[in-house]
Image: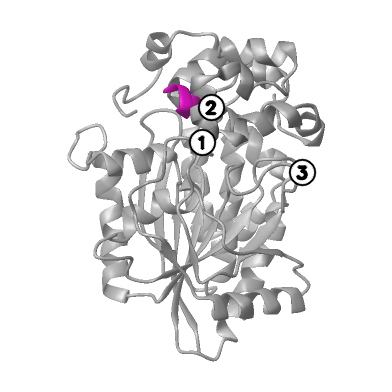
Amino acid sequence: MSYLFDLERSAQGLRLNRFLHALIDSSFRELFKADPEKAMQRLSDKEKDLVRRLDWKGMQDCGASFFCLEKLARTKGVSNPEMVAHFRGESLAEFLKTRRVPGAR
Amino acid sequence: MARIIGGIGTSHVPTIAMAHDRGKQDDPDWKPLFKGYEPVAKWLAEKKPDVLFFCFNDHATTFFFDQYPTFALGVSEEYRIADEGLGTRKIPTLKSDAAFSRHIARSLIEDEFDIAVFQDVPLDHGLHSPLTMMWPTQPDWPGKVIPLVVNVIQAPLPKPIRCYKLGQSLRQAVLSYPRDLKVAIVGTGGLSHQMIGERAGFNDEKWDLEFLDLIDRDPEKLARMSIEDFMRRGGNEGAEVIMWLIMRGALDRGARKVHQNYYLPMTTAMAVALFE
């Protein structure tokens, strides 16, 4: 049960998750695309850096919920298999070799 | 009187909706999935339930962690399709039955299941990714849906036994409604998958097949397991299959599984099963 998203993680990640969750609003997505620094202004410097680099594991370590990370991934055109590969410390190609139907994505 | 004509267990993976919307029905990588839903779609077309009661989870879309309900029932006449970061799917607004939903809310609370209620919110793929595998969207949905949202994304999660008992209480709520409605119960989620941490990409086909057997033959054995057992065997996110126990608890004791399909192409084992 590594990385279980519990109330401690939820409290730790509330600010970051609030930012990620806001990306379901198309006007906030447009702002994030046009002026990312303005969209991220409430985040800490560490969180901003993780978002800029799309460091999925780093954001998770800061309390991001996978389901909030998905909003950022969709906004940036990143697929779930790419995120999963990142968590595993693999390239997408390496990860797909472990799957039964690599084309089903 | 309202009656329960059967139940459906199904995965609600977002990629199912993407494959559907991109027209991948005959793509060899996706065909085994779509073929597996055909008997369910046919059953629904023949039995014509008035209402699909959907037990599913929100994915931090409609609800956020500033306030996250453990069990929440929708009581609106309709629900919009949520934008999850890619714009909204081009499918019709979900139609519901507010009067029936309110009856269910009153009945559950009378039976000491103190659920939260919500209305006039958009709903995410947890409900409509499986729905488009079963019901046509044109010219409009052939029936109504009632949403029950279950917290399976922020621990502590409800216990499996609580989900099963909620299903039993839901059965009484449906059967006590005076209008002549045909209802099918849908439990969504799973099967095995983990999306986070070093164990991301985890699956266990042996556990999945055991689950599909027990949900039919001995659901009370599953209900007696701990949520930690479900996470260990099916992955952190795979524990969401406890929502199938709500569906199973709502069915007649004599109900049996009449169809099942299992497909594990990528990160999540995708299953569908029909009970009547």
In the image, B225 versus B121, the foreground residue is: B121
- Tell me how far mark 3 sits from mark 1, CA to CA: 33 Å
Q: Residue at x 27, y 69 (%)?
A: B45
Mark 2 on the same chain as mark 1? yes
Q: Quadrant of residue A66?
A: top right
Could you classify mark 2 by the number of other residues whose Cα lies within 10 Å: few (under 14), some (14-19), or many (20 or more)?
A: some
**Left-right relation of B49 to B147:** left
Q: Main secondary structure of the magenta part?
A: helix
Horizontal side, residue B233 vs residue B17: left or right: right
Q: Looking at numbered disc 3 in the image, what kind of residue is underneath it?
A: Pro
Q: Chain of mark 2?
A: A
Q: Quadrant of the C terminus of chain B?
A: bottom left
Give residue B60's mark. Answer: none
User: Residue at position x 61%, y 30% from top?
Assistant: A20
Residue indicated by mark 1: A27
Q: Disc 2 to disc 3, how far (Cα)?
A: 35 Å
Instruction: Give the label, 3 or 1, closer to the camera.
Output: 1
- How many neighbours does mark 1 have within 10 angstroms: few (below 14), some (14-19), or many (20 or more)? few
Nearest-to-viewer mark from 2 and 3: 2
Percent across and percent down for residue B10 are 44, 52
Instruction: Please say which color scheme the image uses.
Output: one colour
Residue B156, numbered circle: 3
| Viewer-proximal residue among A93 and B163 | A93
**Mark 3 — on which chain does it sit?**
B
What residue sits right under mark 2 in the picture? A31
